[in-house]
Image (tube, rainbow, N blue to C red):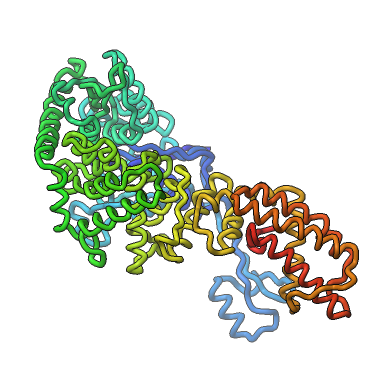
Amino acid sequence: MTDFLLELRSEEIPARMQEKAREDLARLFAAELDKAGLKAAEVVSYATPRRLTLILKGLPAETATVSEETKGPRVGAPPQALEGFLRKTGLTADQLVERDGVLFAIVDKPGRATAEVLAAAIPAVIRAFPWPKSMRWGAPSLSTESPRWVRPLQGIVALFGSDVVPCEIAGVTSGAATVGHRFHHPGVITIGSADDYVEKLRACHVIVDGAERRNIIALGAKMAAQKAGLSLIEDEGLLFENAGLTEWPMPLLGRFDEAFLAVPPEVIQLTARVNQKYFVCRDSEGKLANAFVCVANIDAADGGEKIVAGNQKVLAARLSDARFFYETDLKVPLADQAGKLEKIVFHEKLGTVADKVERVAKLAEWLATEKIVPNCDPALARRAAELAKADLVTGMVGEFPELQGLMGGYYAAAQGEDPAVAAAIRDHYKPVGQGDDVPTDPVTVAVALADKLDGITQFFGVDLKPSGSKDPFALRRSALGVLAILLDNGLRFPLLRSVSQDVLDFFADRLKVQQREAGVRHDLIDAVFALGGEDDLVRLLARVKALQAFVTTEDGANLLAGYKRAANILKKEEWEAGATNPSPEPAEAALAATLDAAEPKATAAIEAEQFEDAMAALAILRAPIDAFFDQVTVNDADPAKRAARLGLLARMRDAVHKVADFAKIEG
């Protein structure tokens, strides 16, 4: 068995593309080999800023011999049919094999040399590579048939064992030569085989394994911060990005002027992260420190002093810009900024952002006035909603859209707004996604709920609903946010007072998605919604959870079976309501008596929202309904008895329907 090495070296590959490219290279190559009947014992792939590498371990020297069988005409078929088949297969009549009166052509295809398969696979993979963005280059780029790559290809290493696999792509010929680090070892390196590739490049200051580079950065940055008495603010995305920018990563700690700490810490962190790819640090009190960690791509002779000095100057310029935006924005009251929103179109069918703000303000005020959000001052809810979008026109949010809401909160606090208003402006977008904090402060809850409900109802109102995988206005995410706010805060909100039935159905679908991870069955949510009129999601979920606990018990499972049997009979039969049986059988009378006892208890428990008690009241029906079906003939020849017994089953069904539509329950 032999190993295969492929290195595709190019100009810099964007960091965000490297991990997927590494996976795509392995996937596409495996698919090409599979066509030839080859499979590697192990597939390893690497990515650095300048190279994609694939190592296939344990390949045979050649593919296996394949026997291909082609079905031909039947024995005794017209001569023309036989002659046509022989021409197609290239065989003679005596080479055909007869089986069950049918002629077959069996051709043994000898195995191909694996190196030959690999040589054909390399250009095929390159041409099929799914880069998000790619380019043509050089003289071959004059043809639209020329290969494309993320950046111009500069070299190809293709070795099967120690032998070069010959191929040529866009004027680049395969060989055994590559280069090391751009600065530390720019000269040519000759690779012997896949076995020495990783360590030869390491010796030339190139760490090909992205995971190893990430570990070096994570540990080095943490140690640099600790050495300065600080702690690193970890950032996985930044870790991947820096590993994708370096082949020999060297974390270095630098400082910036403490005066910049007057700017909100989120601004500093975002400036350092987005513009410069720097990590930031906390001091011993957990506050943002005037320190950053940059990642160099060189082991500098001076220990990185000049690199740090250069990065400090660049960051100082960026932070100066951020401070300018912050101080300039502070000079304009948020109410004045909000006036500019009437010039920004929210949506062509829904007016301006100012129109949306007014709708949200009215709804937030109403939620507070109606006590749907308890302990919420209606005036503060309206004020917060009126200012919530004002920071969209500030310089800082124009530079960093990620800070919308957050900057409004800072500006509101600095300009003397009520703390509850400032907090609501800051957090009214929450929860943004799964795992995000759910607002609990009453004013914030009112504004966040109003903002999300307005978006959903308005877009539904102009028939711009989510469809399939398309959700351009993130309404599904907004609905999940509404559900999280309602359920986490226990808000008793009759949704049908504010939304249409199709919006309520939309919430029902999102509720099933949200509760799936909590182990709540979707069919039970359907069973409660199917009763109609249930639009209080807190009450609905309490009912569903009680129902789930009940149907998993023996009494619940048996009652469900009895219900379904009764429902099936009632579907097929007609009867007159109110019919009575003057001489009921004992099992019939027992079921009627049990219903007399269970129905009022279940009804009272449901009205008191004691759903477990309602289930317990219905549980006593289990034995009588079993006995009824065992001992009583429903379709009696006597019409009066038949009608009375059907009526009894209808009573049983209706009693169960006080809790949920059991017909919707699976099982």
Where residue 53 sits: x, y (%)? 37, 39
Where residue 486 sits: x, y (%)? 44, 48
The answer to whether 652 is drawn above or below residue 111 in the figure is below
Residue 437 horizontal side relative to residue 348, left or right: right
Foreground residue among 48 and 436: 436
Residue 90 horizontal side relative to residue 131, left or right: right
Residue 523 horizontal side relative to residue 261, left or right: right
The answer to whether 385 is drawn above or below residue 45 in the figure is below
Name the quarter where the C terminus is drawn.
bottom right
Where residue 92 sits: x, y (%)? 60, 73
Where residue 236 sits: x, y (%)? 35, 33
Foreground residue among 326 and 199: 326
- The answer to whether residue 130 is visible is no
Quadrant hosting residue 341: bottom left
Foreground residue among 402 and 381: 381
Q: Residue at x 18, y 54 (%)?
A: 139
Q: Residue at x 53, y 43 (%)?
A: 60
Q: Residue at x 49, y 38 (%)?
A: 57
The answer to whether 305 is drawn above or below residue 98 in the figure is above
